Amino acid sequence: MHCSIHTNVHPMVGMDLHNGIVPGVPPVPTPFMPHFVAQVLGGLNLKASLAKTVMSHNFITLQRGSDIGLGIGHVATNILFPLLVLTSSSVSQFGSFTVQLEGKPAAIAPLVYVGFNFNCYDPVPWNTNLVVAPGCNMAGFNYADYVASMVSIALSMAVGFVCSKAFGGLTSASGAIVGRVFGKAFLKEGLEDIAQSQFGQFVQSGTEEIMKYHFGNAIDAGSSLVGHELGLQDNSFTAEAANFYTGEILDS
């Protein structure tokens, strides 16, 4: 299966649920308020994992695990709106582990030209959003890539749940602020970085070896094919992926 590679200008739009506080006298804590959210995947270029030497249609490509970070618009009647924007998160969890962009797996749209990120929901990251990813630069996405991506998603959700339980009880305005700032913005990021460091690559490699054992080396072709018209450095793809390139000449 071939899927479009994410770039910094692909838009993410959707609806997140957050614990909030509705203005009033007194203010009313309100769990699971819907918030309309939107931002491009590059965000404010403060946290996104950009492969700056790898261009797709003259836009910068993204590595798997890229996070839009702060600056995601949240539209709702919520006193905590500024905190939501400052601590926002939207992660491109699905990736092609065979196709390397500056040494890391490429972020892709798992529904070919449409994908979804995992956003800063309460209590755990979730994905009621769409990433619209048009383009003709594609990366191979196979079962092993899917398993590795899902394992990373499970880890992220588990960390989010633990942090929500530890910090996020929405019983007062102060409790909500402490949970949002400390639980979600700092501890959660640190734990996710530790939990997911190199782990997705390990899971993908292990799954692919199991598939090869049962189905033979024919699995290589499907996992290594990539799209065309990418302007890449010589070392941007693994040697295996380059061998199965669809025929266009890679730019040096």
Image (spheres, grey):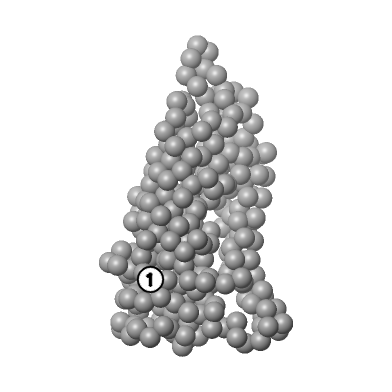
Q: Quadrant of residue 137?
A: bottom left
Frontmost residue, 56 versus 91? 56
Residue at x-position 46% and y-position 67%: 3
Q: Is residue 156 left or right of residue 25?
A: right
Q: Residue sitting at 65 percent across and 55 percent down?
A: 154
Examine the rendering and report whether any part of residue 70 can be seen. Answer: no
Which percent across, then down, holds residue 27?
52, 17
Residue designated by label 1:
137
Q: Is residue 186 above or below residue 247?
A: above
Give left or right: position of 203 versus 56.
right
Residue placed farthest to the left in the image? 58
Residue drawn at (44%, 77%) of the image: 226
Q: Residue 164, can we see it?
A: yes
**Crowd rating for badge 1 (residues with CA inside 10 Å; few <14, some 14–19, many 20+):** some
Name above or below for residue 36 compared with residue 49: above
Please state which of residues 111 and 91 is positioned toward the viewer in this rendering.
111
Residue nearer the viewer, 109 or 156: 109
Residue 205's x, y, as percent? Answer: 62, 76
